[in-house]
Amino acid sequence: MAIQIKQNAVKAAPERKNPAGQPPKPKSRAGRKPSGKIVVSIRLDPEVVERARATGPGWQARINDALKAAFPA
């Protein structure tokens, strides 16, 4: 009994391009120095997040500073 294998049976996904017509850049951290921080998920009240975001860029760092002050080493 012979088995036949179809080649090219899987179609390749169409190449995606950004609005400028260029292929998307790979998402990687290559070339960046490590942040030294740990990624966590935390649930905060919506009001807290809204007020923190309203302070502008760096709001996550300010929350980090507030948590460090609340839990001194």
Image (spheres, rainbow, N blue to C red):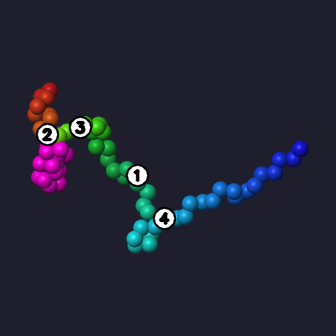
The crowding category of the residue bearing disc 4, from other C-alpha atoms within 10 Å (few below 14, some 14 to 19, many at least 20), is: few
C-alpha span from label 3 to label 2: 17 Å
Residue 26 lies in quadrant: bottom left
Tell which circle, 3 or 2, labels the residue nearer the N-terminal end: 3
Q: In whole angstroms, how far apart are the C-alphas of marks 2 and 4?
A: 40 Å
Return the residue at label 2: 65
Inter-mark Cα distance, 3 to 1 = 27 Å
Q: Secondary structure at mark 3?
A: loop
- Identify which amino acid the numbered label 2 is placed on: Asp
Residue 28 is situated, as x and y percent measured from the top left of the image, at: 40, 52
Question: What distance separates the C-alpha of mark 1 from that of mark 2?
Answer: 27 Å
Q: Are marks 2 and 4 in contact (CB under 8 Å)?
A: no
Earlier residue among tags 1 and 4: 4
Residue 45 screen position, x and y as percent: 17, 40
Residue pointed to by mark 4: 16
Q: Which mark is residue 68?
A: none
Q: Mark 4 touching mark 3, by CB under 8 A?
A: no
Q: Which residue is mark 3?
A: 43
Q: Secondary structure at mark 1?
A: loop
